[in-house]
Amino acid sequence: MANRTLRSSVVVAALTAPVLLLGTATAVAAPGPPPGRQLTIETVSNPRPALVSGGQVLVKVVPPERTQAGRVTVSANGHDVTSSFRAQPDGSLLGLVAGLRDGANDLSARTTGHGRDQRANLRVTNHPITGPVFSGSQQHPFYCETQAFGLPAASQPFCSAPTQVSYQYKTTAGAFAPLADPATRPADLATATVGGHAVPYVVRVERGTIDRAVYEMAALYDGAPSPVAPDAGWNGKLVYTFGGGCNAGYHQGNSTGGVVNDLFLAQGYAVTSSSLNVLDNNCSPIISAEAAMMVKEHFIETYGPVAHTIGWGGSGGAIQQYDIAENYPGIVDGIIPGVSFPDPLSTGGPVSDCRLLEQYFAGPGASFTAAQKQAVAGFASYDTCVSWNLTFASRATATGSCNAAIPVSARWDPVTNPRGVKCNSNEQLANQIGRDPKTGFVRSPLDTTGVQYGLAALKAGTITAAQFVDLNATIGGLDYTGKPVAQRIAADPKALDTVYAEDIVNSASQGLRETPIIDQRTDLDLAGFGNDIHTTEWSYVMRQRLLRANGTAGNQVIIENHATAAEAAAASVYELNAMDRWLTAIDADGSHRSLQQKVLANRPGDLGDGCYLSAASRITEKLTYPASGQCGAQYPVAANTRMVAGASLSLDVLKCRLRPLNFRDYPVTFTAADRNRLRAAFPGGVCDYSRPGVGQRAPIGTWLSYGDERTGTTPPTKLRER
């Protein structure tokens, strides 16, 4: 059953008075309903009729029982489109309805010749292919990079380019090579196996622009694809890839998550992605969700219904999978996030901490030993903090991380260009969080008030009382431009309210509770990788959130492997296969259980937490934090700056509530001078992590909309103005 979660938005036709509701199908008939199945009409390429884009939509009509296909007519805005529909093996009709206008469109299916005619109506709201659909006002300026993909140069604001189709083939030597004519069969052409049958390993690659991004999609070629007649070289399933990083945007991007991938294509999967599904081009999971929804819709309108969609990608690609599954469920049905983080904002605390620690250790804290620095940072190696500072700390500054596509002349300057482009990563959340009218910068939920840096190191005796005092009295903070200042960082209260209410800090309480998850943890904490930012504790952070929100984390499996090509390849093959079996079993579950129950009940018996001891040896055992067992010995798990400061494993408190400073809480004796310095450092008290954070609350729901300012239409949920 395709698009399990999204399909729940379509209401099956009933014999009632005709009512046109947004996203709802209705049917009317003469008095006295006939027995059995009733006429229904629903959108397939985007099962949310209010969110259709691009002027076309794949539609499914299910006739009543014992009704011949020839007695069903379909119209769009009063025009007969029946000829676009083709009968399917299950008795339904499938057709691509084109020519939709922006805004509301009325579709109707009608049966004739029974004396008890039925009609099913569906209102579809179409949005421009350039977007937006639900993400709200688009960034301006927006610099185009279509030429990086071999597409013609494009112009602002939409960066649109004509669609191009090219072909590649896999050689018997294992490489991909260009193919001018897909009908030719080179002597070194390899084969792929789809459904147990060998097929020529020729790949159709399509590139174009959707939602101002460049999209790519790839699938084995078996003639021109059709949405109503499935391709024999396609297994009916889709992998959606997501790329890493986190940055401010204002440009199209020169890469996607990648689509020409042998792991997927060799088994008949189709693969899609978009440049706005690379978080380094766009640090907004909301914009990423919109782009993925629109690209997936276009794919289905080209190739036909999808059995299920698997998310794939690491780091920022993992953030997008976790956050899209949580807040826009149904775009991806199961996710395989690699070297994961839960969301951009949770990660931001330790990143800013590392910048402040690096500054402190280079100055007043220069006497700290390597072991003491590591104890304060909490990572397996302090080099991780060094790497955070070098690679991502600039993302909190005004212009320090601007992409080369953004001209220097266009960038913000407080004197010469105060309205210029700001490259702070929060820029992509302007529609959600809003701007501070005093500064013009996006409101920030970042906070260090009351944070006791190095608290666990003090309690362990690794640092002295004097060092603890000096660290916390001197560490300082960052101002709204990212400039180091003497004062601690204070979050904007409105930003805190928003990020919790709208689940931007991922609570794992909505869509994730009914999403199959295989958290792919390539271990980069060990010797030789101590400078890597992708530390293992983050997989357990998300597990803790799942446990707290839902009482179970049975839908999340964590599998660890060493950072070798052989183990990574073995893990990828197994995890893709296991996820496919898991989703296939859920699709086949016709019980009346909830989707969450089906997800838990249908996890494959061989799939569970575990780790690779070698590429040829995977063991299954429960993974815990702190680490234990055989996997714990192979893959120890450390902490981070906020956990050392007393935060819980869930790491979802951006701004802590405070309690009075009490010197009896410490296992050391402070001098009178040190007490005065601590009182000055913590005038309002210290963090009390036993209480919810400031602004922390349950989210208000999924599929939130921030508007479509160009067509004047909005999806069903409209948020408050900011």
Image (cartoon, rainbow, N blue to C red):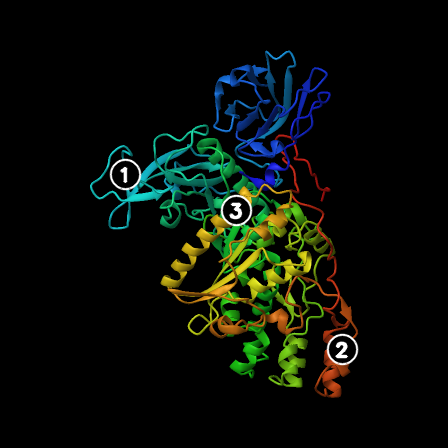
Which secondary structure, mark 1? loop
Give the labeled residue for mark 2: 679
Q: Is residue 144 visible?
A: yes
Residue mark closest to the camera, 2 vs 3: 3
Measured as percent of width and height from the top left, residue 343 is found at 59, 56
Measured as percent of width and height from the top left, residue 704 is found at 66, 42
Q: Is residue 670 left or right of residue 233?
A: right
Residue 206 against residue 276 in the figure, above or below: above
Q: Where is the C terminus found, in terms of image quarters?
A: top right
The amino acid marked with disc number 2 is Arg
Q: Is residue 246 visible?
A: no
Residue 230 against residue 498 in the figure, above or below: above
Q: Nearer the viewer, residue 58 or 473?
A: 58
Labelled disc at residue 207: none
Give the labeled residue for mark 3: 585
Q: Residue at x 63, y 37 (%)?
A: 8
Tell whether label 3 touches label 1 (CB within 8 Å): no
Residue mark closest to the camera, 1 vs 3: 3
Q: Nearer the viewer, residue 462 or 649?
A: 649
Residue mark closest to the camera, 2 vs 1: 1
Residue 43, located in which quarter of the rendered image? top right
The amino acid marked with disc number 1 is Leu
Which secondary structure, mark 2? helix
Give the labeled residue for mark 1: 179
Q: Where is the N terminus found, in terms of image quarters?
A: top right
Q: Nearer the viewer, residue 119 or 360?
A: 119
Measured as percent of width and height from the top left, residue 199 is found at 31, 39
Q: Residue at x 66, y 85 (%)?
A: 466
Q: CA distance from mark 2 to mark 3?
A: 59 Å
| CA neighbours of label 3 inside 10 A, class few (<14), some (14 to 19), many (20+) | some
The amino acid marked with disc number 3 is Ala
